[in-house]
Image: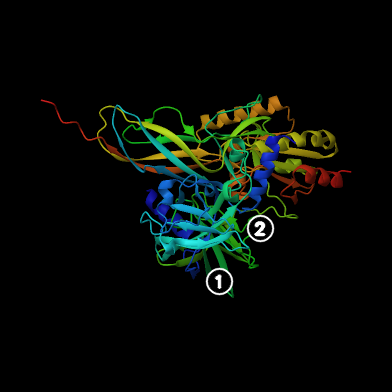
């Protein structure tokens, strides 16, 4: 048995402590830190999404991997619903994922479990002055060792306040 | 010209569905139960956090804290676990969020147990307390094993706690008191009958059994449950007042098929990836495995690999598999998106070399969502030659054994 397999066996035993019947969106709790941001037009601002992933499930880190047949897990993703043009500025970053040899896909996959986080940067177009509550739509897929839950989406509200206009220098 | 006709239709629908359907009134429980749990790895507590304790810890004690905040319905709590030299463990939780730990915010773990029960304030309608069960564990964690081979400090690797709750309640119907449970999403504090997963103990045996159709998520429609000869749906579940109301619905609104052994699977139509239509009943006379899968699901792909030799062995003797491909289960899809998903699944099937027929997602969504309520992948339902369910969990060795018995 490889050390990785032993490690996962140990993890499996740990998970067995917490066998609860959970489904789909119930396995993932998300909140944004901070929940209110001030967003300047010319300066991307970082937001951290704190994730609580219910045992015994894991979700997949924002690393897209496909096997030779075109199959692969759905990495966690974020899209922004905004009326004023707030958008993502750059790729998502996550807390260090657990690397695992997946017997189904026949390749390495990158998982998040327990507590984890996702960092994202938001930007808004020049000229946008009004604040709004944008919705961060987090798409994800949760699995345990034997099964996967149907991929789901969770909407996370985030209040965006406009940067106060700079005083004119006379 | 349309108005009289629409009025007539509305009257007919009202009469035929029983506009004055019976209602049954009950109550939500006065307290909620702990729900979904999460495991939080611990790390030595920071000096800044340790300084918030009201008294110095015992000499030689180890102070630990979760690596990330303990979040309960959007509120983060400061937590310290103190492990005394004799192994005694005490949990400190800043319950009132005043930035420090008071003597009233300490809970000692029993010597012969690993769990403490407490509550945190929760101003949510009739509910004033959120029950919290915190357990410590010494099981190895993968991340820890990857970075630190030594023993965990204090013999503790993680705290496990519930970040969610379950609302329960009872409604008297006829001579019975029906038990209901509601499992809200982590961020939700109320119950939406059309969206919140609901359990209803239809057979009154004290358990809510998903496999018997006693658990359902509406996906935008209030689920209908069958209780004896009645069809019931939650009309009101109000966390502010505790009001819980079940309303009678028509039999036609009950679409669920529990797929219990011996039940005859309803016929349905599906389209393969080439757009050719088929019906399930075309396969009568054969053992048929309905395999719900997606290219995103590792366990599904592993299962399909195990099906290959069984298909080769039993297909000519009367065994068929219908791949029920579900590539996307969230959000509404456009025709172009369906086409792209079909292409992805078709390409995968061709490359992986699986030879059995496949059903495209758009043609089987109603069967998957509204009839069978598939909520775990893979789901493998084996039907006998008469179209009756043999097993809803026909995977691996179970499938091999069932085929060996049925097609010796």
Q: Which residue is mark 2?
A: B212
Q: Farthest right residue? A: B408
Picture quadrant where residue B111 is located: bottom right
B181 displayed left or right of A130: right
Viewer-closest of B275 and B93:
B93
Q: CA distance from mark 2 to mark 1?
A: 20 Å
Extreme residue in the front direction: B59
Same subunit, labels 2 and 1: the answer reads yes
Picture layout, residue A54 above or below residue A61:
below
> Which image quarter: residue A162?
top left
What element does badge 1 sit on? strand
Residue in front for this viewpoint, B239 or A28 = A28
Residues under numbered marks 2 and 1 in contact, where contact means CB atoms less than 8 Å apart: no
Whole-percent x, y for residue B94 in the image: 42, 56
Tell me residue B378's x, y (percent): 67, 42
- Residue A31 as seen in the image, left or right of residue A23: left
First along the sequence among labels 2 and 1: 1
Residue placed at 52% from the left, 41% from the top?
A: B330
Q: Nearer the viewer, residue B281 or B221?
A: B221
**Residue position for label 1:** B173
Q: Is residue B274 visible?
A: no
How packed is label 1: few (under 14 Cα within 10 Å), some, or many (20 or more)? some
Label 2 Cα neighbours within 10 Å, binned few <14 / some 14-19 / many ≥20: some
Callout 1: residue from which chain?
A: B
Q: Residue at x 70, y 35 (%)?
A: A3
Label 2 lies in what chain? B
Q: Residue at x 33, y 31 (%)?
A: A85
**In the rendering, which numbered label is found on residue B306?**
none
């Amino acid at each position: 048995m490889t050390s990785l397999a032993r490690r996962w066996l140990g993890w499996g035993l740990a998970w067995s402590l917490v066998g609860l019947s959970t489904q789909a969106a119930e396995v993932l709790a998300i909140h944004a830190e901070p929940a209110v941001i001030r967003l300047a037009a010319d300066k991307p601002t970082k937001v951290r999404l704190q994730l609580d992933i219910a045992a015994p499930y894991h979700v997949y880190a924002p690393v897209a991997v496909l096997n030779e047949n075109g199959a692969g897990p759905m990495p966690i993703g974020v899209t922004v619903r905004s009326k004023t043009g707030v958008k993502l500025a750059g790729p998502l970053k996550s807390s260090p994922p657990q690397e695992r040899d997946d017997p189904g896909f026949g390749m390495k996959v990158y998982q998040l479990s327990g507590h984890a986080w996702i960092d994202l940067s938001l930007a808004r177009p020049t000229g946008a002055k009004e604040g709004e509550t944008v919705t961060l739509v987090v798409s994800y897929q949760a699995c345990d060792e034997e099964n996967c839950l149907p991929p789901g989406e969770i909407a996370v509200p985030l209040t965006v306040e406009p940067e106060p206009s700079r005083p004119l220098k006379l | 010209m349309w108005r009289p006709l629409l009025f007539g239709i509305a009257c007919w629908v009202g009469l035929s569905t029983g506009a004055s359907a019976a209602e049954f009134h009950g109550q939500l429980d006065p307290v909620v139960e702990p729900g979904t749990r999460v495991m939080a790895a611990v790390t030595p507590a920071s000096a800044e956090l340790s300084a918030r304790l009201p008294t110095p810890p015992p000499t030689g004690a180890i102070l630990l804290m979760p690596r990330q905040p303990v979040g309960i319905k959007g509120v983060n709590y400061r937590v310290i676990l103190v492990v005394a030299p004799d192994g005694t463990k005490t949990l400190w939780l800043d319950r009132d969020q005043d930035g420090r730990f008071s003597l009233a915010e300490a809970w000692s773990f029993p010597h012969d147990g690993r769990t403490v029960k407490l509550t945190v304030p929760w101003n949510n309608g009739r509910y004033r307390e959120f029950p919290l069960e915190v357990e410590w564990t010494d099981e190895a964690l993968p991340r820890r094993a990857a970075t630190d081979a030594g023993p965990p400090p204090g013999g503790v690797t993680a705290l496990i706690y519930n970040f969610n709750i379950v609302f329960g309640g009872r409604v008297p119907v006829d001579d019975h008191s029906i038990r209901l449970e509601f499992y809200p999403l982590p961020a939700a504090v109320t119950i939406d009958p059309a969206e919140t997963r609901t359990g209803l103990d239809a057979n009154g045996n004290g358990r809510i059994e998903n496999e018997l159709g006693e658990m359902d998520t509406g996906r935008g429609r209030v689920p209908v449950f069958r209780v004896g000869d009645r069809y019931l749906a939650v009309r009101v579940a109000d966390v502010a007042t505790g009001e819980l109301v079940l309303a009678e619905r028509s039999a036609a609104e009950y679409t669920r098929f529990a797929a219990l052994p011996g039940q005859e699977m309803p016929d349905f139509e599906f389209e393969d990836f080439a757009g050719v239509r088929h019906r399930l009943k075309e396969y009568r006379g054969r053992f048929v495995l309905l395999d719900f899968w997606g290219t995103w699901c590792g366990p599904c792909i592993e299962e399909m690999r195990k099906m290959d030799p069984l298909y080769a062995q039993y297909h000519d003797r009367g065994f068929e598999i219908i791949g029920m491909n579900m590539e996307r289960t969230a959000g509404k899809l456009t025709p172009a998106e369906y086409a792209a998903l079909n292409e992805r699944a078709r390409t995968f099937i061709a490359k992986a070399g699986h030879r059995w027929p496949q059903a495209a997602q758009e043609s089987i969504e109603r069967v998957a969502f509204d009839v069978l309520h598939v909520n775990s992948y893979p789901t493998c339902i084996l039907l006998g030659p008469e179209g009756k369910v043999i097993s809803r969990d026909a995977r691996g060795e179970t499938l091999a054994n069932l085929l060996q018995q049925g097609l010796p």
